[in-house]
Image (cartoon, rainbow, N blue to C red):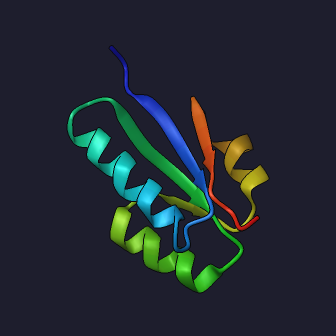
Amino acid sequence: MAQARIGVIGVGTFGINHLRTFRQLGYVGVAELVAAADINQELLAERESEFGMKAYADYREMIEKDDLDGVTVVTPD
């Protein structure tokens, strides 16, 4: 079974939990954390360094450039 290629929109307080979950799912071969997008460039750079995924300031660019199977949206209400 192929790994699902995942992107995350929003890497803040709750978004980091999604990043951690998809990283864990990568360890067992279920999903691959490919990319994340956030408007907070400083925080996004920190997450990129920690998780090793591609980082985008604009979620539309992420969706356009990466061949993703799914995206989670973790932004404030």
Residue 65 visible, this angle: yes
| Residue for point 62% across, 63% down | 10
Corner quadrant of residue 30: top left
| Residue for point 53% across, 52% down | 35
| Residue for point 56% across, 46% down | 7
| Residue for point 52% across, 66% down | 14
Q: Is residue 53 above or below residue 42?
A: above
Q: Where is residue 9 in the image (x, y as percent from the top left)?
A: 64, 56
Corner quadrant of residue 12: bottom right
Q: Where is residue 40 in the image (x, y as percent from the top left)?
A: 66, 80
Q: Which residue lies furthest to the bottom in this view?
A: 42
Q: Nearer the viewer, residue 24 or 13?
A: 13
Q: Where is residue 13 in the image (x, y as percent from the top left)?
A: 52, 73
Q: Is residue 65 left or right of residue 25?
A: right
Q: In this view, does 7 lie above or below 38?
A: above
Q: Which of 75 and 2 is in front in this view?
A: 75
- Which quadrant holds the N terminus? top left
Q: Where is residue 32 in the image (x, y as percent from the top left)?
A: 39, 39
